[in-house]
Image: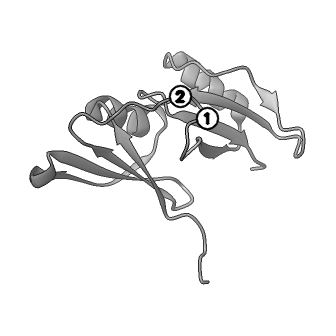
Amino acid sequence: MSIRGIHHVAIIAANYARSRDFYLNTLGFTLVSEHYRAERDSWKLNLALPDGCQIELFSFPSPPPRPTRPEACGLRHLALASTDLGADIARLASLGVPCEPMRVDEYTEHRFTFLADPDGLPIELYEVPA
C-alpha cells in the first residue's frame, strides 16, 4: 500500500449556503474550487485545511437527515487538530457556535471538545502541540 494520509472527507449539506458559510467563515477553511453540477442540481465545494487535507462539501436535493448523533453507522465525527483549544472555543462562542464542555482524553491527556456543523454533523476539536 502506498497510502500517505487522508486526502479529503465528503460532507452532504442540507442547506448549501449555510454550510458553505460555516466551513469557510466560521471554521476558516480555504476555498479551493466551487462547481455547480446542473445535471445533479448539486454544488461541489472543495475546501482546504492548513495541512493539505480537504473537505468536499456537496448539496443534493432532499438528502435524508442523519439518524442519530453521534453514534450513527458510518462517519462518527470529523476531528480537527487545534493548537490552541481555548482560543478556538472562545472564537466559536463569539460567533454563536456552542461547544460542549472541554474534556481530557484519558489516554493521551490532550484536551478536546465537540461542536456541530449546521446539519448537526459532530465536529471534534482535538488539541495537539503547536
Q: Is residue 33 left or right of residue 51?
A: left
Q: Is residue 125 left or right of residue 48?
A: right
Q: Is residue 32 left or right of residue 94?
A: left
Residue 32 in the image: above or below residue 108: below
Q: Position of residue 2 (x, y in %)?
A: 59, 83
Of residue 122 and residue 84, the one placed in the foreground of this image is: 122
Q: Residue at x 55, y 43 (%)?
A: 73
Q: How many marks?
A: 2
- Residue behind mark 1: 71
Direction left: furthest residue: 38
Residue 12 in the image: above or below residue 99: below
Q: Secondary structure at mark 2?
A: loop
Q: Position of residue 22 (x, y in %)?
A: 41, 32
Q: Quadrant of the N terminus?
A: bottom right
Q: Quadrant of residue 14?
A: top left
Q: Residues within 10 Å of mark 1 (few under 14, many from 20)?
A: few
Q: Residues within 10 Å of mark 2 (few under 14, many from 20)?
A: few
Q: Quadrant of residue 102?
A: top right
Residue 9 in the image: above or below residue 115: below
Label 1 with label 2: CB-CB less than 8 Å: yes
Of residue 72 and residue 1, the one placed in the foreground of this image is: 72
Disc marking residue 68:
2
At label 2, the amino acid type is Thr
Q: Residue at x 70, y 34 (%)?
A: 85
Of residue 44 and residue 65, the one placed in the foreground of this image is: 65
Of residue 82 and residue 122, the one placed in the foreground of this image is: 122
At label 1, the amino acid type is Glu
Q: Position of residue 64 (x, y in %)?
A: 34, 34
Q: Position of residue 9 (x, y in %)?
A: 47, 54
Q: Secondary structure at mark 1?
A: loop
Q: Residue at x 48, y 27 (%)?
A: 120
User: Distance between the Cα atoms at labels 1 and 2?
Assistant: 6 Å
